Image (cartoon, helix red, strand yellow):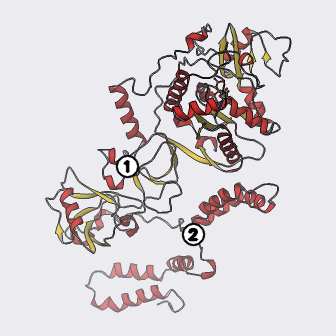
Amino acid sequence: MLDTGRWDPALSKLLLTLEESRPNLPSGCEEELGFLSDLLQSRELHALVKVHNSIEQKDERFCPILSNSVQVAEEVLDLVASQANDENPEASDLYDILQNPHIQGLLYSHDIIAQKDYLPKLPDIPPDLEDPEDPEETIKIVQLVKSSEPLGATIRKDEESGKIVIARVMHGGAADRSGLIFPGDEVIEVNGYTTEGKTPDDVLQILKASEGTITFKLVPGDTGKHKRESKVRVRCLFNYTSKDDPHIPCEDAGLDFKKGDILHIVSQDDIYWWQARREGDRSMRAGLIPSRSLQEKRILLVRTNNPESHVLDCTPCKFSSSMGLASTISQSIPLITGVDSTMCSKNSIKKIPYTLTEHDDYDRDEIPTYEEVAKLYPRPTQFRPIVLIGPPGVGRNELKRRLIELDPDKYKTTIPFTSRSQRPAETNGKDYYFVTREKMEEEIQGGKFIEFGEYKGNLYGTASESVRSIINSSFVCVLNPHSQALKMLRTSEFKPYIIFIKPPEFEVLKQSRHNAFAKSTFDESNSRAFNDEEFNEIIKSAERIEYIYGHLFDEILINDDLPKSFERLVKIVKKVETEPLWVPSSWVQ
Ligand SMILES: Nc1ncnc2c1ncn2[C@@H]1O[C@H](COP(=O)(O)OP(=O)(O)OP(=O)(O)O)[C@@H](O)[C@H]1O
């Protein structure tokens, strides 16, 4: 017999008990007893137990005080980002330290250890070890105290067996926090009432009528594994109200959201219903939202039943006739026509103007549901372009002009290309880049222009290279392109921040423009005020743009009172320069 005095007390005790019970055990099991005794005395097992005890030992000096340091660091980064500048070197240092990949790696490893994520996953007990004669062995009794908080689990009737089973457990809900209830568990009793022959509704009635403690008798299902929370964040590209959704499995569990909201998807286990939490929501309870595939199916169904449902009234605008413009460029190039800005604009900013007759190249295969996002931290030398989208006449050019005027050494816009011949007062590379029509057509066909159009037989356009060169020279590129240009602009290379300049309601629009003696941008030949028809067209065109491209907007700015709108724009632009913001996750990888 080995001296067990210096060995693990629990193992020694086990060995002692084994020796003591030896005389009472039935004959014939000596071999097994011998094996067990050898095992309990083996040096390997004792060494393993020692290692295990060391890991488990609660040494206060090494106890983690939190297990989500990565998340805390992200929150600190968010807070510090706007303070990190030359005037605040401490904040800048902290900002740099927390962004350092080694520090982030260290925090990540810390969290893994703090969460004990390294512990081995024990294999399931083989089914042949369970005693089929004794089903009671595998029953668990779970008691939950009833409160105003929902249980956080849904039940369903298994079609084959007719049994009531737990359909889903909401992350962070009461059932989940108990750590004892899992999807697939069979509910055999609730508060002493058997569920046999009952429907899920009957069971809900029992639950509703219960007071105080609720006791569940459950047979564990084979899916009773606790799944870790996913880290996926998405931007919602549609509005959702659970009470209007007749198919939600549990209305109380629904999570409502609006287009543009950021959600943390905590579980995608169910193919139709994801569990999500609003980003930054401190309450840990998740809610149900339709999964991407369910939402895609729904949109496709609506589109199949009503093919035009996703396109608003596309009737060309009446005003285009007064402009009498013709588009002659080949079919492969979108038909965009325009007036030369130098004819109707006194300011120095060139634009590629268009008629309101739009032929939006709207991709019918694109089904806006959710976009996976990640935070992009501002870069000190490369600024995100500011893209002002909106209907003609709403004031994008005016806002862009004011922004550049505010700090011409910081904000720059592109110089357009044209196939028109140079006029005596114009400078190549300042007013326009003058190129031949052939060269311009070739480059347009080569996809080198983010937007282009034709007016009076001459081409006008903005080259991608112009945007790239401004960004790479550490200026903030400010653009007010046609909405169609978003497809070319919204890339991981440019990482634009898209602001939709929206008109206010009719009366405010009319009043503000009249008060400011605003000049209509619809009539190239006359310098006159906007008329009611044009105001209506601005509003209608804005609705259409928002409907088609709304899911791509980072911000909506209502251009009512000009000085106030400009103030809001400056704030937004500052935010983009200093704060980490959500962008498509592919832009960050
Ligand atoms: N909030 C506002 N209040 C009053 N006037 C405004 C406001 N915003 C813009 N304006 C004026 O409205 C007119 C049209 O604005 P602007 O040229 O900027 O429109 P736009 O969106 O660039 O349209 P387009 O692309 O057709 O040129 C200008 O005279 C401008 O000064």
> Is residue 165 visible from the viewing direction of this image?
yes
> Is residue 503 visible from the viewing direction of this image?
no
Quarter-wise, where is residue 226 in the image?
Answer: bottom left
Report whether 369 appears left or right of 589. left
Residue 485's x, y, as percent? Answer: 62, 26
Compared with 164, 566 (above or below) is above
Q: Tag 1: Cα neighbours inside 10 Å, few (<14), some, or many (≥20)?
A: few
- Residue at disc 2, secondary structure: helix
- Residue 114 - label: 2
**Along the polypeptide, which appears first: circle 1 or circle 2?**
2
Quarter-wise, where is residue 10 in the image?
Answer: bottom left
Spatial CA span between label 1 and label 2: 29 Å
The amino acid at mark 1 is: Asp
Quadrant location of ligand 1? Answer: top right
Q: Which of the two residues, 418 or 158, is positioned nearer the viewer here?
A: 418
The amino acid at mark 2 is: Ala
Q: Residue furthest left?
A: 197
Q: Which of the two residues, 162 or 302, is positioned nearer the viewer here?
A: 302
Q: Which residue is mark 1?
A: 270
Counting labels gives 2
Report whether 501 appears left or right of 236. right
Q: Tag 2: Cα neighbours inside 10 Å, few (<14), some, or many (≥20)?
A: some
Quarter-wise, where is residue 127 in the image?
Answer: bottom left
Q: Residue at x 67, y 58 (%)?
A: 77
The quadrant of the image that shows the C terminus is top right
- Residue at disc 1, secondary structure: loop
Residue 536's x, y, as percent? Answer: 51, 25
